[in-house]
Amino acid sequence: MEFSDLKGMFGEVKTRMDAGIERVRREMAGVRTGRAAVSLLDAVHVEAYGSRVPLNQVATLSIPEPGMIVAQPFDPSLLKAIEKGITAADLGLNPANDGKIVRIPIPALTEERRKELSRHVHKQAEEGRNAIRLVRRDANERLKKLLKDHTVSEDDERKGLEHVQKITDDHVKMIDELQKKKDQELLGH
């Protein structure tokens, strides 16, 4: 097996790492920065029709004003379930329903809450970096096994390890940039 034969493995490594970045991106989109954004509710799931479904599948979400999100259920009988789902998501939001819609005021963030959210963002980023490193470890173990089984040469194994490290470094850098951007939104520096 030649170094070029390892392309499939590198593609798989990149795909798995991309998925880790996408997960971090989604989680960070759910961290509120004091402005209303329907992405804040991406993590909210609602008990409906015997299963847990994403909020956006049972209601239309809109932003009538900068500090307010409105959830208009497709089925009015789900009002309580929507309220319960938003509260259970532990986003620090207090939904209220008026019998037709659920209003979700977005409170202004205190400095203390901003710092708390920043710590949460750092934790999400670190979990993302750890997931990337796990993918790297799996790939490195596969390369070492290929060398041990005499499927690849020492040179190709070394090149493979270097290539996996480069993919890892690129993905860790992307997570660092996501974290930095979110911190900028939260803390303004």
Image (tube, rainbow, N blue to C red):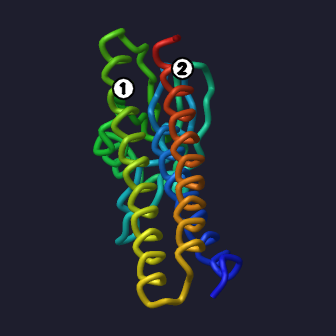
Residue 124 place in picture, x, y as percent:
38, 41
Q: Residues within 10 Å of mark 2 (few under 14, many from 20)?
A: some
Q: Residues within 10 Å of mark 1 (few under 14, many from 20)?
A: many
The residue that label 1 is drawn on is 117
**Quadrant of image for the N terminus:** bottom right
For the residue pair 85 and 171, the one nearer the viewer reads as 171
Q: Residue furthest front?
A: 154
For the residue pair 128 and 2, the one nearer the viewer reads as 2
For badge 2, the amino acid type reads Glu
Residue 120, quarter of the rendered image:
top left
Residue 100 place in picture, x, y as percent:
49, 41
Residue at 52% x, 75% y: name it.
154
Q: Which mark is residue 185?
A: 2
Asked if residue 76 lies left or right of residue 63, the reply is left
Alpha-carbon span between mark 1 and mark 2:
11 Å
For badge 1, the amino acid type reads Leu
Residue 90 place in picture, x, y as percent:
30, 38
Whether residue 172 is situated above or below residue 63 in the rendered picture: below
- Among the two numbered marks 1 and 2 on one chain, the one whose residue lies closer to the N terminus: 1
